[in-house]
C-alpha cells in the first residue's frame, strides 16, 4: 500500500487525468448496493475502461511537443511597456511578418478569422470586403460593394462568407461571387456562425434574432427580443447559446428552441457595447457605455471581477489560453488571467494613433491579435495567446484542399440539430432521474398542450322533456348553485308556463271538438 | 525580456513528399472538442439509420428438395457442409460456398426425421419414420448405398451422435443408445413416456443426453450411470433442444407456447430466461458457437435471432415464399444462419442483417467498431431505440402480435383485479414469469 502511494506520487500523469475525465465521478458510489451481479460487474468494468481512457488521454500529452508562448520580464521591466516594434526585434522573421498594418480608406473595419486561424475576412463600413490567407499573403477576393457593410463572418470554412449589407445579408463564395441573398434578414448589424450546427445567426435594427441553417437553407428560428435595436452579439463556443447585449444594460441568452430568453442578466447601467465568451464557455466579459468592464462566471451568472476602461470599450475578445483583449478608443489592451485574480495592470498595450478600434479578434492557434479600426486593419503579436497544439481533425491550420473537402462532408454528416442547443451541453442521453409519476404527468401535460380539447358550448335544442338544458341541470352537482344554474332553472320554468298557457287557450271560450287534441285538462262541469 | 512566440514551420507540419501520408497532429484536450456528446449522438443516430438501410439478411435459397426440409445438421469441422433431410426421404449434402447440392440420394422410404454428422471422417447419420437409421459416406462415389443400416422396432423421431465415441442415440418410443458395430441398441432408456420427440447429446459434457417427450416433459439422462437425472414437466410440449456449446450445463428448449426457455440443468425448478416474441409454436432452436446468441424457427413462418441473455428477439427474418420453419442452424463461423422450411428450400441468411461480408481493412473495421460502440452507448435514447427496433413484418405476424399482446394484457389486468378484490390473507403468491410454465420437476 505504501509502495502504491509512492508510485502515485511519482506518476506525473495522474495530476492531469482529471482534465480528461468525463462525468462527476459518482458512478461507483452506490454500486455495491446493486443486487444484480451482471449489472454490477458491467458498471464496474465500464467505469474502469473510462478511467483507463482518461489516463491514456492524459498520457498522450507527452506527444504535444509545442510549448505555449510567453513574455518574461527581467528586473524592473514591465510587459505592458513592451512595444510591438521592440517585440519585433526579439522574434524570428516569420513571426515578425505577422505584425503588420493595412491602411485602408473604407473603415471602420469588422473582421473575422476562420476556425483554423488561417484565413481572414475584413469588411469596411463603406463597402470594401476582402478575404485572404493572411499568413501566406494570398488574396482570395476583394469586393467593392458600394453599400454599407455592417459585419462580415466566415461560414463553416474558407470557401464561403456572409456579409451584412445595407438591407440584406448576402453570402459570397471565395471568388467573391454572390451566391445567396438572404431577404428575411433585414438591416443586420451583427452576425455569427455556429459551425457545428451550421447556423448563421443575425441580429439587427429590428431586434429580431434569426437562425438560418446554411446547409438546408431553412430559417430555423426567429425570436423577437423586444429590446429594440441590438448590435452586440456573441456565441458561447461551448454551448452554442447566443448572448445578446442590449441598450438597457441587460445581456440575454438565447437558444433557437425558446421564444423567450433562457437567462436575462442585468450587467451594466448603460448600453452594453461589447461582449466576449471564453473558449470553455465558463467566463463572459461585458463592456458597457458606463465605462465598466465586467467579467462573469457563466455557471453562477455572477460577476467575478470588475475593471474599467478610460473610454467605453468597443470590442472584446478572449483568446484560447484565456487572454482578454479590449479595444477602446485608439487602444488595444490585453489582460492576462483577468478572471480568477484581480489584475492591476494589463499584460500588453497597443496604440493605433489617430484611429478608433472597431473589432478585436484573437487568431486561433496563433500568438496574434487582429483588429479592425477606422483606418484599416492591424495585426499585433501577443505571446501566449494561442493554443500551441492544434487537433488536425478539428481545426487544422495546415489543411490541404482534400482534407478541407473531407472535413466538410464529415461535419455535414455530424451536423447537430438545432433542437439540441441547451444550456446543459451534456443533456442528450442523460437519464431523467425524476420519479416516473412526474415524467408521466409531464408527458400527459405536453400531450394535452399539443392537442387542446375545445370546450363544448351549451346547446339549447328544441324543447322537449330531455332537452340539453335539462340534461345539463341533471348532470351538475346538486348542491352547487351558480348563476348559470339559477338562470337555467328560471328559463325552464318560464318556458313551461308559456307552453301551458298556449295550450290552455282562453278560459272564457267554450270548448270545441278539437280541444281533445290539445291535451289540456278541463274541469268537469 | 524573455520572449517566446508560437511559430510553426510549414515543413514540420506537412508531409515532405506527395507519397507520404499527411501528418495528423492530435490534441485530446476536451475544450478543443466542443459538443462531444451531441456529436457522438448524431454519429450514433446516423450509424443506426445506416445499419437499418443496409439490413439485407437474405443471402440465398438452396433449392433441390421436392418435399419440405425437416432436419438439418452442420459438420463440426467443415464450414462448407450442410446435410438436410426431406419429407420424401430425400437426403442432400450442400456446399454452402457454392450454394448448391453436391450429393443427394433418396435414402429412406418415409420422411427423414433426423440427421446428424460427427467428427470422425465425412460420414453422417440419418433416421426416418421407416424405422431405419443409416450411415452415409458422400465421398464414396463407388456406391450410393449406405455404409451401415440399423433397423428398429418403431419409427425414429430424432437422432444425435456422441461427440467422440462411436455411439449415437435415437428417439422414438424410447431412447435407444446404439453402437456403430452392433445391430441392436446397446441400451434403452425410458421413464414412462410414450413418445420421445427429440434427443440431443451434450457436446461438451459428452455423456449427458437431453430428450423431450410428447407428454410435455424434458428428461435428462447420464449415460455413465444409465440413470435419468431430471424430469421436467412444462405446461406445453417442447419441440427442440439446443445445448449451449460454451456453458455445458445450459440449454434452450423451444416450446409450443411460443416461448423459448433457457434452463440450467442443475436448477430446473426455474427457467434462467424466457425468450418471447414468436407468435406461434417454436419448432427449432440452435445456439451460435459462442453461446451468446440463438436462432429459432417458428411455425409462424419466421426466423428470430435472440441474444441468449435477453428476453426479446433482436431481429426477425421472413420472406414471402418461406413456409413453416422446421429446422434452423447457426453456422460454425458465427456469421450465417440456415433455415429449412416446409416449402422445400434451405435458406441462407446473415446472422447480423447489415454486416458487410468479406475482408475489411483496418480503417473500415475501426470505423465499424466505433459505430457499434456508439450505438450501444445511445441505445436507450428513444429516437435511436425506435429506429433500431423498427421492422417491417408480414401483416399476419403484425396482427398476431397485436392480438397476442391484447390477450396477455387483458389477462394481466384480470389477475390484478382479482388480487385487488381478494382478502390479504388468502392472497396467493405471485408466480414469477420464469416459473409460470413449469408444472413440476422430478429427480
Image (cartoon, coloured by chain):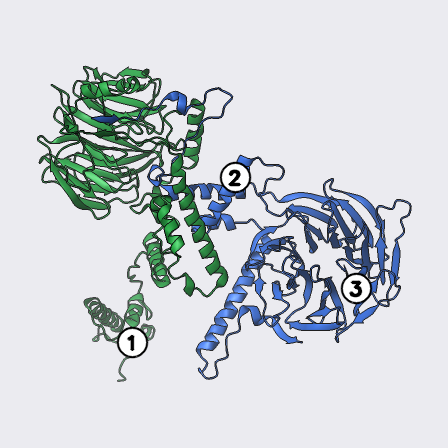
Chain colours: A green, B blue
Instruction: Kindly identify which chain the residue marked by label 1 belongs to.
Output: A
Instruction: Label 2, secondary structure: give it.
Output: helix
Whole-percent x and y of residue B22? 46, 26
Whole-percent x and y of residue B52? 53, 44
Q: Residue at x 26, y 75 (%)?
A: A478
Q: Marks 1 and 3, how far apart in space?
A: 97 Å
Circle nearer the viewer, 3 or 2: 2
Marks 2 and 1 on same chain: no
Q: Nearer the viewer, residue B279 or A102?
A: A102
Marks 1 and 3 on same chain: no
Q: Quadrant of residue B199?
A: bottom right
* Residue for badge 3: B170
Instruction: Label 1, secondary structure: give it.
Output: loop
Circle nearer the viewer, 2 or 1: 2
* Residue for badge 2: B366
Whole-percent x and y of residue A305? 15, 42
Q: Label for residue A520?
A: 1
Position of A256 relative to A375 (above/below) = below
Circle nearer the viewer, 1 or 3: 3
Mark 2 closeness class: few <14, some 14–19, many ≥20 residues within 10 Å: few
Amino acid at each position: 500500500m505504501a509502495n502504491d502511494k509512492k508510485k502515485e506520487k511519482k506518476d506525473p500523469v495522474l495530476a492531469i487525468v482529471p482534465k480528461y475525465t468525463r462525468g462527476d465521478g459518482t458512478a461507483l458510489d452506490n454500486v455495491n448496493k446493486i443486487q444484480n451481479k451482471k449489472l454490477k460487474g458491467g458498471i464496474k468494468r465500464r467505469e474502469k475502461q473510462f478511467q483507463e481512457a482518461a489516463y491514456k488521454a492524459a498520457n498522450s500529452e507527452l506527444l504535444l511537443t509545442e510549448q505555449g508562448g510567453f513574455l518574461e520580464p527581467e528586473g524592473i521591466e514591465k510587459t505592458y511597456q513592451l512595444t510591438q516594434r521592440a517585440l519585433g526585434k526579439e522574434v524570428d522573421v516569420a513571426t515578425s511578418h505577422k505584425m503588420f498594418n493595412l491602411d485602408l480608406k473604407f473603415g471602420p473595419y469588422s473582421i473575422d478569422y476562420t476556425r483554423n486561424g488561417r484565413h481572414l475576412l475584413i469588411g469596411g463600413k463603406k463597402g470594401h470586403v476582402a478575404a485572404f490567407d493572411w499568413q501566406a499573403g494570398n488574396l482570395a477576393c476583394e469586393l467593392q460593394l458600394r453599400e454599407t457593410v455592417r459585419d462580415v463572418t466566415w461560414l463553416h470554412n474558407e470557401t464561403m462568407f456572409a456579409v451584412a449589407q445595407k438591407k440584406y445579408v448576402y453570402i459570397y463564395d471565395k471568388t467573391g461571387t454572390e451566391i445567396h441573398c438572404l431577404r428575411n434578414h433585414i438591416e443586420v448589424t451583427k452576425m455569427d456562425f455556429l459551425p457545428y450546427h451550421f447556423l448563421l445567426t443575425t441580429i439587427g435594427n429590428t431586434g429580431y434574432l434569426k437562425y438560418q441553417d446554411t446547409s438546408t437553407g431553412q430559417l430555423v428560428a426567429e425570436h423577437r427580443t423586444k429590446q429594440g435595436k441590438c448590435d452586440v452579439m456573441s456565441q458561447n463556443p461551448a454551448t452554442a447559446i447566443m448572448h445578446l447585449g442590449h441598450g438597457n444594460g441587460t445581456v440575454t441568452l438565447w437558444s433557437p428552441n425558446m421564444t423567450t430568453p433562457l437567462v436575462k442578466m442585468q450587467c451594466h447601467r448603460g448600453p452594453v457595447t461589447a461582449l466576449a465568451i471564453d473558449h470553455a464557455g465558463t467566463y463572459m466579459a461585458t463592456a458597457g457605455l458606463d465605462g465598466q468592464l465586467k467579467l462573469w462566471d457563466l455557471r453562477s451568472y455572477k460577476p467575478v471581477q470588475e475593471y474599467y476602461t478610460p473610454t467605453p470599450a468597443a470590442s472584446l475578445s478572449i483568446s484560447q489560453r484565456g487572454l482578454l483583449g479590449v479595444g477602446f478608443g485608439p487602444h488595444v489592451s490585453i489582460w492576462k488571467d483577468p478572471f480568477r485574480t484581480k489584475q492591476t495592470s494589463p499584460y500588453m498595450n497597443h496604440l493605433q494613433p489617430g484611429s478608433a478600434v472597431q473589432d478585436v479578434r484573437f487568431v486561433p492557434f496563433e500568438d496574434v491579435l487582429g483588429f479592425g479600426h477606422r483606418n484599416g486593419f492591424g495585426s499585433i503579436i501577443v505571446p501566449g495567446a494561442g493554443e500551441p497544439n492544434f487537433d488536425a481533425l478539428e481545426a487544422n491550420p495546415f489543411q490541404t484542399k482534400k482534407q478541407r473537402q473531407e472535413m466538410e462532408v464529415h461535419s455535414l454528416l455530424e451536423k447537430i440539430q438545432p433542437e439540441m442547443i441547451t444550456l446543459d451541453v451534456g443533456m442528450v442521453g442523460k437519464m431523467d432521474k425524476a420519479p416516473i409519476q412526474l415524467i408521466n404527468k409531464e408527458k400527459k401535460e405536453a400531450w394535452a398542450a399539443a392537442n387542446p380539447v375545445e370546450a363544448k358550448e351549451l346547446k339549447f335544442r328544441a324543447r322537449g322533456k330531455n332537452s340539453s338544458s335539462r340534461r345539463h341541470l341533471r348532470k351538475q352537482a346538486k348542491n352547487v348553485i351558480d348563476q348559470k344554474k339559477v338562470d337555467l332553472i328560471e328559463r325552464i320554468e318560464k318556458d313551461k308556463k308559456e307552453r301551458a298557457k298556449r295550450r290552455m287557450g282562453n278560459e272564457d271560450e267554450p270548448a270545441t271538438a278539437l280541444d281533445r287534441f290539445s291535451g289540456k285538462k278541463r274541469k268537469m262541469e | 525580456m524573455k520572449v517566446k512566440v508560437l511559430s510553426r514551420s510549414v515543413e514540420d507540419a506537412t508531409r515532405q513528399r506527395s507519397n507520404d501520408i499527411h501528418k495528423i497532429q492530435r490534441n485530446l484536450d476536451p475544450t478543443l472538442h466542443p459538443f462531444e456528446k451531441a456529436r457522438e449522438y448524431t454519429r450514433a443516430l446516423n450509424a443506426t439509420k445506416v445499419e437499418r438501410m443496409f439490413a439485407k439478411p437474405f443471402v440465398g435459397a438452396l433449392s433441390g428438395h421436392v418435399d419440405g426440409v425437416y432436419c438439418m445438421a452442420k459438420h463440426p469441422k467443415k464450414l462448407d457442409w450442410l446435410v438436410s433431410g426431406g419429407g420424401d426421404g430425400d437426403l442432400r449434402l450442400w456446399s454452402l460456398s457454392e450454394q448448391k447440392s453436391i450429393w443427394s440420394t433418396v435414402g429412406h422410404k418415409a420422411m427423414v426425421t433426423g440427421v446428424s454428422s460427427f467428427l470422425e471422417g465425412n460420414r453422417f447419420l440419418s433416421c426416418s419414420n421407416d424405422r431405419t437409421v443409416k450411415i452415409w459416406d458422400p465421398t464414396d462415389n463407388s456406391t450410393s448405398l449406405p455404409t451401415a443400416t440399423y433397423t428398429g422396432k418403431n419409427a425414429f423421431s430424432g437422432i444425435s451422435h456422441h461427440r467422440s465415441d462411436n455411439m449415437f442415440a435415437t428417439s422414438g418410443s424410447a431412447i435407444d443408445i446404439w453402437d456403430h458395430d452392433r445391430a441392436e441398441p446397446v441400451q434403452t432408456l425410458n421413464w414412462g413416456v410414450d413418445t420421445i420427440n427429440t434427443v440431443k447429446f451434450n457436446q461438451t459434457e459428452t455423456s449427458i443426453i437431453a430428450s423431450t417427450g410428447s407428454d410435455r416433459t424434458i428428461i435428462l439422462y447420464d449415460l455413465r450411470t444409465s440413470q435419468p437425472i431430471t424430469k421436467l414437466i412444462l405446461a406445453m410440449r417442447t419441440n427442440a433442444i439446443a445445448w449451449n456449446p460454451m456453458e455445458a450445463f445450459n440449454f434452450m428448449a423451444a416450446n409450443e407456447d411460443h416461448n423459448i426457455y433457457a434452463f440450467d440443468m442443475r436448477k430446473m425448478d426455474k427457467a434462467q430466461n424466457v425468450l418471447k416474441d414468436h407468435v406461434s409454436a417454436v419448432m427449432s432452436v440452435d445456439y451460435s458457437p459462442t453461446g451468446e446468441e440463438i436462432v429459432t424457427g417458428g411455425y409462424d413462418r419466421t426466423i428470430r435471432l435472440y441474444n441468449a441473455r435477453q428476453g426479446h428477439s433482436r431481429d426477425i427474418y421472413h420472406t414471402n415464399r418461406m413456409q413453416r420453419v422446421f429446422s434452423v442452424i447457426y453456422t460454425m463461423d458465427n456469421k450465417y444462419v440456415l433455415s429449412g422450411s416446409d416449402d422445400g428450400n434451405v435458406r441462407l441468411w446473415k446472422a447480423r442483417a447489415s454486416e458487410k461480408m468479406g475482408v475489411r481493412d483496418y480503417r473500415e473495421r475501426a470505423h465499424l467498431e466505433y459505430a457499434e460502440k456508439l450505438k450501444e452507448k445511445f441505445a436507450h435514447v428513444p429516437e435511436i431505440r425506435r429506429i433500431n427496433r423498427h421492422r417491417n413484418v408480414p401483416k399476419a405476424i403484425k396482427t398476431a402480435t397485436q392480438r397476442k399482446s391484447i390477450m396477455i394484457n387483458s389477462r394481466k389486468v384480470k389477475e390484478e383485479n382479482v388480487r385487488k378484490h381478494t382478502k390479504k390473507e388468502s392472497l396467493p403468491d405471485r408466480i414469477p414469469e420464469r416459473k409460470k410454465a413449469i408444472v413440476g420437476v422430478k429427480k
